[in-house]
Structure formats: structure tokens, C-alpha cells
Image: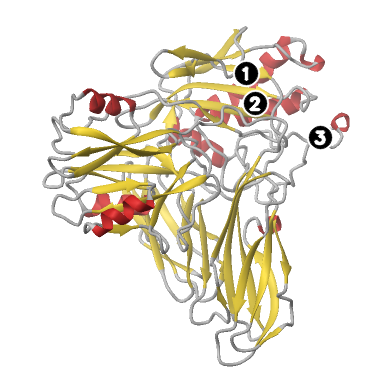
Amino acid sequence: MNSRSSSRPAPLPRLCAAVALAAGVLAPAAPALGDDLVVAPAPRSRGVDAKFRLLYDPPAAWPASFLMRYNPSGAPPAFADSSIMTSALEAALAKWQAACPIDVAFGGVTGVPPESTVFDAENGPQPDQVNVVGWKATPSGISGYTVGTPGYAESGLWPILDADVVVDPAKISATPQLTRLLVHEIGHVLGLNHAQIDGTMMSGPPYSLYNSLDNLTADDIRGCRCLYGLPAGVTTGLLCTPPPIVDFGTIAAGTTSQRSFPVVNNGNASTTITSVTVPSSYQASGCASGTVLPPGGACTIQVTFAPTSGGDHGGSVDIAAGDPPAYRVRLLGAASGGAGSPFVVDIEELDFGEVEIAAPAPRQRVRFTNAGGTAIVLATMSFEGAQADDYSRAGACKNGLSLQTTAYCTVDIGFTPSAAGERRAQFVAQAADGRRSTVTLRGMGKSTPGTPEPNAAVPVPVVEYYNASIDHYFVTIAPDEIAALDSGLLVGWTRTGLGFKAHAQAQNGYQPICRFYLPPPAASHFYSASPQECAVVQSGNPSFILESTAVMFLAAPNPVSGVCAAGTVPVYRVWNARADTNHRYTTSLAVRNQMVALGHIAEGYGPDAVIFCAPQ
């Protein structure tokens, strides 16, 4: 854009569309329900690990007091008396109120059903801002879910505007089940996501297992306090900034990759870090043992992923500080190739896209070739990682097979998701001499057909503009910016007739896109789907203005092949390589090639340099 004051759209507050979060909790088995419910395994690490996840990105919380109401329509006979739900809801609210200072109360019975909307002439259906617990059928495998809507704020926590809880009348048979479910769902209402570890009230897919806990754990309490502060009379240190997950992706064995994150004491008393420990494939530095963090004090932990062999290298950073348990940051990392790899694979990562729970995805084939100078015996083939049981294999590669030089065999990988959310694993082919070759596997599980996912997000247009006077391109999803550009309020900008689609709200399988304004001489904008790239751009360019960490949501391509998942189309990015930096984003390969012919540089992943994947 040409000028920050007159010809670039200013960011304006706008209401975000509702996001449906299928965040139900499994009820314990009941004879009357037969096989209608899946019984989750017993928690494996109750009270040992602690690292909550926040539901919204950016984080959101209720800005003031709010009410939860009850709609008894559709209640099963066991709950025909509304006082039963009233008591269960009040008991669930009381458990969270004892943990952190939230101002919420039961608001009585209402005739408004959950997930109701009001029509706005400019923005279409909007949440009605009446928070309701009600009854209706839920997707397969869950007994309830929460639908939450965040608003927008220039800084700090975004406000939560509306939250409804749906309970399935066919899957709840007793008051204790109902109360447990409501405690879990109220956690979502408050802005907490499923924890990335087992054994907490907020545990659930994709990183942990549902359970039948009755009370909040230390992890649940810490998450609530990081959103709403400490209760009166409580004095303690509190670490809110470590991320729940650090994902290194897949790198070659024998190479390294680094990530860092801040550790800030958000409590009202000093806390001392007594240890920071990582698994053998990682090293950690910073926040040394004995570091004292006063309230507001901070240090930085840098984690280096240095795998020496292929395969899954998941683990955690354990930060012991203050009262136990330790804060646990989940590490995701895998290694493939490298000097020690016995086979060459034709693709290092398979992405199965989104698949119905319990439904098999089409198999994908991987070729393993002996590129060495001697024969190799294939000793074992196995799946490793958090969701290894969701994957299967078939094909010509067999244990004990001897492959001569240049010979190859194939493996057909199958994927059948057992739960909703991202499902990750590694396929490892190991030679008789112990060397390993690895293929990264990922897929998304979604609810089975029969009950639709609530309020599935609909992608919206991203419009491209061109300013001939400065030879700059600009894309935007914001209705206020589009209106200002189309009206001529911002002089010199005209539509090119091109664009693509994106999600305006967080959606499974899609990444938040950060947007920077680059001051003159660039006077332009930059978009990225990589949180690491966003952080590098911000730290390395203090004059750049971070306008949003989530201006829209797009999928990321396969980092090796550049291939987009089913249901998405490639988006290409080119850079003009001039002092007045400007990038163009297009789904047209012909346009991308035309820009390259004019001297622009293609930026992206894989041979086609794909930067984003846009929903169709």
C-alpha cells in the first residue's frame, strides 16, 4: 500500500463469526446405552503433568460478569425436573469459581435454544449473546460440545461474546455424568481448550484422552488463573507463557532445528525455576536452575532438536517451578533421511487430510529404494508416535526382504482415525544393521456422518487489488478494507478480478496468518502462515508493524512436496525484489509464472513454491 495515512486500510474492530468447537466429554459406560458410547481408557498420568491449552488464538476471556441459562426443551425423562439441571450447572460453575475469580452465575430458565443467532444486515447471522445450556443430538463419540464466539480487542485478551453448551439427551443417564460433563464444558465456555496431557478435567482429543474425573486438577486451575487471575488471598507464582506444544516438524537425521519461547511469571509472588529437563534428542538452554522470577520477571528457554536417527522423537520440556507438578511443554519432532538412512523414499511425509472417524482413508504408497552399494535386508517395519494405532500397512515390502542395489519395494499406508483432531505418527523401516528410514504421517479425524458438525465455518473471499502508480498488489479479507478500497476512499486501488478464499475464524486444519505493515520505502504488507517466520520477521525488523497474528486462516502445504491437502488449492507468493518491497499472492500458476518472468522471486515450499493452501 502507498501511504499509511491515506492509502492503506486501517485495522478496524469487527465481530468474528461463530466458531463451533466439538469439545464433548465422553460419559462413562452405562448398561442402558449399550455400545452407543466409547469408553475412554483410565488416565495414565493423573496429577503428574501440567500444561493447559487455551481455546482461542489470540486468547479470549469474559470481560465482565455473565449468566448461563438453561433451556429444558428436549430433556430426557430422567431430567424432566429442571431443578436437576439447575443444581448440576450451579455445582459445575462453583468448581471453577473456587479456582479463579470468574463472575458467572445461573441466569434461570429460558426459551432460547442453544446456538441461536440474530440477523445483522451487514454481517449476516450473528450470535445472540444469550448463553444457554440445552439438549440436542451430538456428533458420534461425544456427549456434549461447546460453541464459543470471541470478539476483537486492540490489545490484551479478546472478549468472549457468547457461549452455548449442547448436551445429548440420549447419552446422559445420571446426574453425576451430567455434572462431570458440565464441569468440562464450562472450562471451554471460560476459554480453555483440551489439555495436551492426560489426567486433567480438560483432557481430550487430539493430544490427550477423555476421562471421568470429578474435580479440577492443578493444570485446569493454572489455565483458569492465567485467563482470569488469582483469587483474593492467594499468593503464588504462575507461568502462563510457555506454549503447550512446540512442533519441530520433520528434519533430516544428523541436522538440528531450534525453537525458543518465553517464560514469564504472571503471578503475584516470586517463583524459582529448579530445573528444565528435555529428552535425549533435545538440548535446552536458558532459564537455568536457580533462576528467580519476580512477578512480571521473564527468561527465555531455547530448545534444540538434534536427532541422530530417523523416527519419532516426541517428548517434553519439563519446567519445575514453584508448587508441583512441573509445567510440561509437549515436543513434537521427527527425523528422516540423513547419512544413516538405509533407504531413499520418494516422499517423506504423507498427509491424509480430513477423514471421518472410524472410516478408512484411501491408502497412499511410498517407495523405499536401496541407493547404496551393497544389498540391504529389511528387518522391521513399524509405526511410532502418539497416534500410531490409527495407521496400518500393506504392500510388497516385507520383513526379511533383501533389496539389491537400486532395487525397491513399496508400502501402502492406511489411515483410520479413532478420534477427532490431528492424528500423527511415523512409519519406520529399519535395516538389519539398525539404520532407519522414516516417513512422517498425519491426518485429521472428524465426526462420523449422521449428525453434522455444528456451525461449520464457511470460507469467505480474499480480494486482490492493484495500484498502478506504485506497481503494488494487496489482498484483504476484511469487509471494512474492501469497502474502503471499492469506494475509492483509498485512491489508486482497483480490483484485479483475482483472489482466493480463506476462513475468517479458527478452523481445524488451518493456520493463523499474521500480517505486517512494512513502512516506506516498502509501504506494503506481508503475510505468513508460519508462527516461526512471523516471530523472525518481528524480531528482525523492529520498524515493521504487526497488525494481526490471525488476520485470516489458511492451510499450510506439505513442507517437502508443497502439495496441498484435499479440499484446498495452492496459493503462490512472489516478491518484487525491490527496495519498495511488495508481495503478490495468487492461486493462478500462470500469473505466478508471468510475475517471475518479470523479475519477481517465487517463495514457498516444494518444486512449485506453494506458500499457502486456500479452501475451495
The tag earlier along the polypeptide, 1 or 2, is 1
First along the sequence among labels 1 and 3: 3
Q: Which residue is mark 3?
A: 36
> Nearest the camera: 440 or 375?
375
Query: Does residue 518 sit above or below 388 in this rendering?
Result: above
Quadrant containing the N terminus is top left
Instruction: Say which of marks 1 and 2 sits in front.
Output: 1
Name the residue tied to disc 1: 133
Question: Quick check: marks 1 and 3 in contact, CB under 8 Å?
Answer: no
Q: Amino acid at mark 3?
A: Asp
Location of residue 38 (image quadrant): top right
The residue lying at 74 percent from left, 82 percent from top is 400
Q: Which residue is mark 2?
A: 182
Q: CA distance from mark 1 to mark 2?
A: 9 Å
> Which residue is drawn at the image coordinates 48% and 60% (left, top)?
249
Q: What amino acid is at disc 2?
A: Leu
Res. 229 visible in picture: no
Between label 3 and label 2, give the one nearer the viewer.
3
| Relative side of 236 to 184, left or right | left
Q: Position of residue 381 (x, y in %)?
A: 69, 72
Q: Position of residue 559 (x, y in %)?
A: 45, 60
